[in-house]
Each structure stands twice: as structure tokens, then as C-alpha cells.
Image (spheres, rainbow, N blue to C red):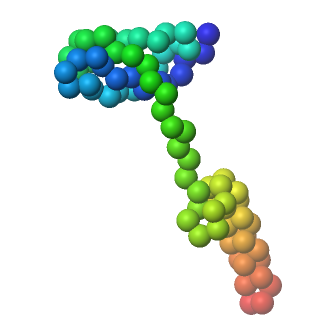
Amino acid sequence: MARRLYEFVCVGEEAHLFEKFTDENNRSAVCPHCGELSNRITSAVRFDLEPFSGAFPGAYAAWNRKRAEKLKQEQKQNS
């Protein structure tokens, strides 16, 4: 079974929030801060978009790399 990173919140007074690699079926863990039982919670998926166009980072990086290569070739031809 694959291990994935999940978020947990403990049931203690301070409600510590932490992440842990665990199996999909494991819904509880021991809090590393206070030793109390912790429950797995659903966390929001986070991904970053390129701030100007809203494109995905991989697409923007590929476009930027190709553009830089093309400009370099054009400068070489013009020299």
C-alpha cells in the first residue's frame, strides 16, 4: 500500500496540527507534540499558478525556456 502525506489534528487542549506519512486506511495517529490521539482531517489541495497569466508553473517554465532558447538563436544569427 502506498504511503501518503496526511494532516492530523490532536484532540488535546492545544489541538496541534501536523502532517505525517501514513497508509490511506490509517485515520488516527499519536501527536508528536503532546502524545494525545490525533484524527486525520481533510486538507485543501494547494498549487501555485504563474502570477501574470494564470498558467501552471510547468507550462510557464517550459514556455520561458523555449523563448530564451529562441532569443539566443536569433541573437547568434544576427551577430
Question: Given the current orientation, which residue lies at the most extreme bottom position?
Answer: 79
Spot occupied by residue 77 in the image (x, y as percentages of width and height) = 80, 84
- Give the residue at x 27% y 26%: 16
The answer to whether residue 20 of the structure is visible from this angle is no
- Give the residue at x 72% y 64%: 63
- Give the residue at x 39% y 16%: 39
11 above or below 56? above
Q: How many numbered discs, if any?
A: 0
Q: Is residue 75 left or right of residue 53?
A: right
Spot occupied by residue 69 in the image (x, y as percentages of width and height) = 72, 70
Q: Picture quarter containing residue 61?
A: bottom right
Closer to us: 37 or 75? 37
Spot occupied by residue 23 in the image (x, y as percentages of width and height) = 53, 12
Location of the C terminus by quadrant is bottom right
Q: Is residue 1 left or right of residue 73?
A: left
Closer to us: 14 or 60? 14
Spot occupied by residue 29 in the image (x, y as percentages of width and height) = 37, 12
Closer to us: 64 or 35? 35
The answer to whether residue 56 of the structure is visible from this angle is yes
Question: Given the current orientation, which residue lies at the most extreme right position?
Answer: 77
Location of the N terminus by quadrant is top right
64 above or below 59? below
- Give the residue at x 64% y 68%: 53
Closer to us: 43 or 33? 43
